[in-house]
Image (cartoon, grey):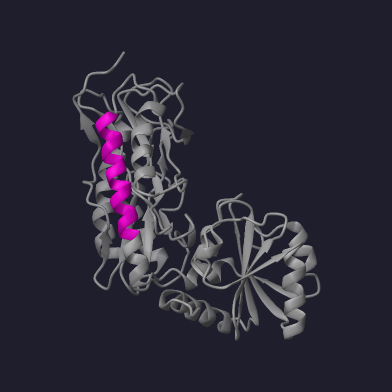
Amino acid sequence: MGLSSELEWRYANTRRAMAEHDLDALIVSGSEYTGFEGSVTYMSGFQIVHRYAYVVLPAHGEPIIVFPSEARYVGEHGTSEIEQVFAGTPGEEIAKRAKAAGWKRLGVYGLDYIMTVRDYRALEGLDLVNFDVEFDHSRATKSAAELESVRESVRINQRGFEIFFEHYAPGKSAAEVMSHAEAYFIAEGCGRHLMDMVLTSEGRNGLALPEFKIARISEILTDFMLPSLEVAGPGGHWVEVSRAVGTTDAQLSDHTKRQMEAYVEHFEAMRGALKVGATCHDVHRAVSKGFTDRGYHLGHVTGHSIGMTMIEHPKIGEGVDFVLGENMVFSMHPHVIADTGDCLYMQDTWLVTPSGGEPLDTLPMEIHLTDVAGTS
């Protein structure tokens, strides 16, 4: 069975990056255990259900995907577009093939965070090159099929936020409100590709604190809070779309109001800054200006590339000289914390175009307020 045109397109991108660094082959690691399974899907069409796998792409020749044989079922194996190999120790199988093919210099995506220790040890003697940044850069530009998947994920994510807001009220638990959004996400085909959390105020009104929390039954919502919604739709592309929510009678803190002003400026700056030819540093400076002018220090990068892995390189940050190209996709979420702990953390997913950034969701950049009465 021949490869799909989409997978051929991805391999061509990857091999160009490999050629720039004189690689004989690339090992792409993926693991459900660490949340890095998307890289394997990107390179093979296979989605890991549990355990881990490696895609091996030679500079010349046919790719393979290698699974640990102690788990004969790692996912829906019929979805893989390339040859599947099971091995007692996948690293030994890859090393054997490398030596037989005369490969010397191998790039590894996931060398620091994904590849298992036993597989790394089995590759001793080969020249292994950490290829995390380079691989991410090669997949930063999205194909037409990928952009369709991204847009579908954004549609699902935005509707999920709207459902969250429809059910939000002070006195309800975070679990109760989030359950409505997550039921919708599951029904739309997200599966377990969900990273949905809340930022609350531990009983204080008018502000939110910067700790991301699981939406538990014990977490009772007040008159202002921040849902953090991150999902991947059926196509496997992650996006991030959310806004702060509160009640019309909430007495918002002064820092919350000032940070909201800066967020509006950030959003408008994105339209002009996130364009083909700009550097990530340029974008960061442009979109963070509203915050720094008000005396705030960024507690996190202002954004990052996003795809089949939730956080990918390049990041939008100080000193990052990566040059943006058309059809790159970025999650933007300036993370600013006042000295008093007041935090405003909202997320959007943007597309790079020749004329500037295109927000892929249609939510107004504002705090979404409701006049619903509290439940307690």
Residue 273 lies in quadrant: bottom left
- Residue ranking furthest to the top: 376
Q: Which is more toward the observer, 347 or 175?
A: 175
Q: Which residues are magenta?
A: 150-167
Residue 94 placement, left or right of 339: right
Q: Residue at x 37, y 66 (%)?
A: 146
Q: Characterize the magenta stretch by its predominant secondary structure.
A: helix
Residue 109 in percent (x, y) is at: 61, 66
| The magenta stretch spans residue 158 | yes
Residue 77 in percent (x, y) is at: 56, 62
Residue 273 placement, left or right of 318: left
Residue 221 in percent (x, y) is at: 36, 24
Please say whether residue 141 is visible from this viewpoint.
yes
- Quadrant (top left, top right, bottom left, bottom right) of the C terminus: top left
Q: Residue at x 73, y 79 (%)?
A: 98
Q: Which is more toward the observer, 294 or 336?
A: 336
| The magenta stretch spans residue 159 | yes
Please say whether residue 211 is visible from this viewpoint.
no
Q: Residue at x 70, y 79 (%)?
A: 105
